[in-house]
Amino acid sequence: MAAPYDLKDDSVVVIIGSGAGGGTLGNELAQKGIDVVILEAGARHEYEDFINDEWESFGQLAWVDKRTTSGDWRVAKDFPNLPAWIVKSVGGSTTHWAGASLRFQDHEFQALTHYGKVKGANLLDWPITLAELEPYYAKAEDKMGVTRTNGIEGLPGNNNFKVLKAGADKLGYKECNTGHMAINSAERDGRMSCQQTGFCFQGCKWGAKWSTLYTEIPKGEKTGKLEVRPNSMVQKIEHDKSGKVTGVLYVDKDGKQQLQKARVVAVAGNSIESPRLLLNSESSMFPDGLANSSGQVGRNYMRHTTGSVYAVFEKPVHMYRGTVMAGIIQDEARHDPSRGFVGGYEMETLALGLPFMAAFLDPGGWGRSFTSALDQYVNMAGMWIVGEDMPQADNRITLHKDEKDKYGLPIANVNFSDHANDIAMRDYAYQRGQELYKSVGAVRTFPTPPYPSTHNLGTNRMSEKAKDGVVNKNGQTHDIKNLFVSDGSQFTTGGAENPTLTIVSLAIRQADYIAKEMAAKTI
Ligand SMILES: Cc1cc2nc3c(=O)[nH]c(=O)nc-3n(C[C@H](O)[C@H](O)[C@H](O)COP(=O)(O)OP(=O)(O)OC[C@H]3O[C@@H](n4cnc5c(N)ncnc54)[C@H](O)[C@@H]3O)c2cc1C
Ligand code: SF4
């Protein structure tokens, strides 16, 4: 068979979502000769279509369908209907992302073993180790062209990096460089090198930054074995009397409901939509939703302990020029409870454009202090803090009791409260970040609260035992053999590192497993 596929073709693997997990899995399976249909809720915008304006670009790419929030996190107050910054577009959040691509550290796969029981946290060891994932990390780094791997040069440092590095030296940090970035520092894989234009979150108009939109997906399509259907919102996964999944119901580009048959279904809608879809797929056989015999679907939502520190200097920095996140300090990523918390965090350069800065610096803020900070925008440097947050059973995605989307399906509510460990880590990191900038002459510093979550993790977590999670070490649901989860919702714990390299590595590994099981006819 070859693409396009018939709706009644029940030999295809259907993947829901075309981002880091789904787009990678689709290409990997297609390369192995397996027939794949990717259903993607968003439109297909090629990189020439990206818009050079922060809010307009957000409107073009982001998932802005209504969600609700609860819990004591500040995002629920500042952005009650925008808990997460996630993309709805072919390529998923790899269109908006910044490209920071780090491997997890060994101990982070065994958080429970290393940190011990932490009150209020639902810590668990991953059912896989770093050693098992290493060969797949290597493949992912090669595929994505990650700098400082495979002999690829690091990116040049912009002014924001130079300020970070000067402060890192003053504080005695040793592990500071321009990062492991999935951004070409020289022409590679038919894509050009980074042009240092900045504003990488608006999509990279040059294609220098890896995105499944213009790497994995066209490569898969070239095989003739991958069909991507944009504007196709999956509403429900169907199953037969034996409990095997048989296909998915979706609304197509013309607003018509369609049923696409499938041999295997892989859910990769990111950590809010994936559990929402499983919960919305309830049936008389699975009244609590699909793959939810453990009651864990939607639970343990993690978003990383984030926050930013901006600082104003006497002279211009122009932090917005050059690659947004090509700058990192890794010294604080270690697990060292003497700092007052378990786990660690990274410090990464981050520049927002002026419109986003106005929205995120101090949401709701006004008056002289706030406006004078914006006046000094050109003199600002900035960093992002990204650290391991604690999984908690009640930090979870649930279906809203009353509110429905335009198709009549309950929308997602995201409940999140910071764990004491998250707060201790953030406060410590704010302190260190401010010290760093003050050590090189900052005249004002701004610890900045977390904004809507870009790292969404853990709501269909991997576990050794079926009762503790939703999927096994291959992302296969414990309950249903031919139903997989292929995105960041599989994460058992979050680690300190930006998650995408791990999502891509897991997808490459999962493709091997699915191909093997299909050949053995066990799925
Ligand atoms: C501004 C920004 C900066 C970031 N920077 C970094 C970084 O530097 N490093 C890093 O590691 N990570 C970064 N991330 C996070 C990274 O983008 C995500 O971790 C990653 O893309 C998640 O992959 P995923 O497969 O889980 O989901 P996504 O890539 O979000 O893909 C999910 C896709 O599924 C689709 N979908 C959802 N539900 C349905 C449905 N029912 N039917 C059909 N389609 C559906 C969505 O439309 C979406 O396209 C950043 C994210 C943002 C927003
Ligand atoms: S700075 Fe580099 S990676 Fe970022 S958008 Fe410009 S060319 Fe792309």
Image: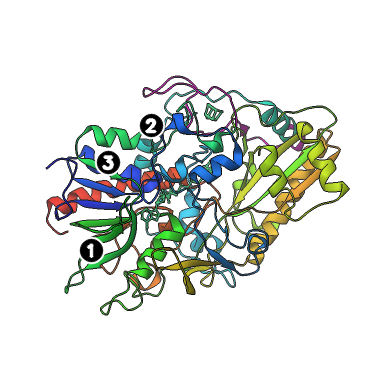
Residue 504 part of the magenta-drawn span:
no
* The magenta segment: 169-198
Q: Quadrant of the N terminus?
A: top left
Measure the C-alpha gap from mark 1 to mark 3.
Answer: 20 Å
From what the image shows, is residue 469 above or below residue 134? below
Label 3: state its secondary structure.
helix
Measure the C-alpha gap from mark 3 to mark 2.
Answer: 14 Å
| Residue drawn 56% across the image and 50% down it | 496
Any part of residue 42 in sight: yes
Q: Nearer the viewer, residue 241 or 230?
A: 230
Q: Nearer the viewer, residue 504 or 343?
A: 504
Q: Which residue is mark 1?
A: 481
Q: Which residue is mark 3?
A: 28
Badge 3: residue crowd in 10 Å (few <14, some 14–19, many ≥20): many
From what the image shows, is residue 416 above or below residue 128? below
| Circle 2 or circle 1, nearest the eye | 1
From what the image shows, is residue 141 above or below residue 122? above
From what the image shows, is residue 267 above or below residue 123? above
| Circle 3 or circle 2, nearest the eye | 3
Q: Which residue is mark 2?
A: 142
Instruction: Identify which amino acid the numbered label 3 is placed on.
Output: Glu
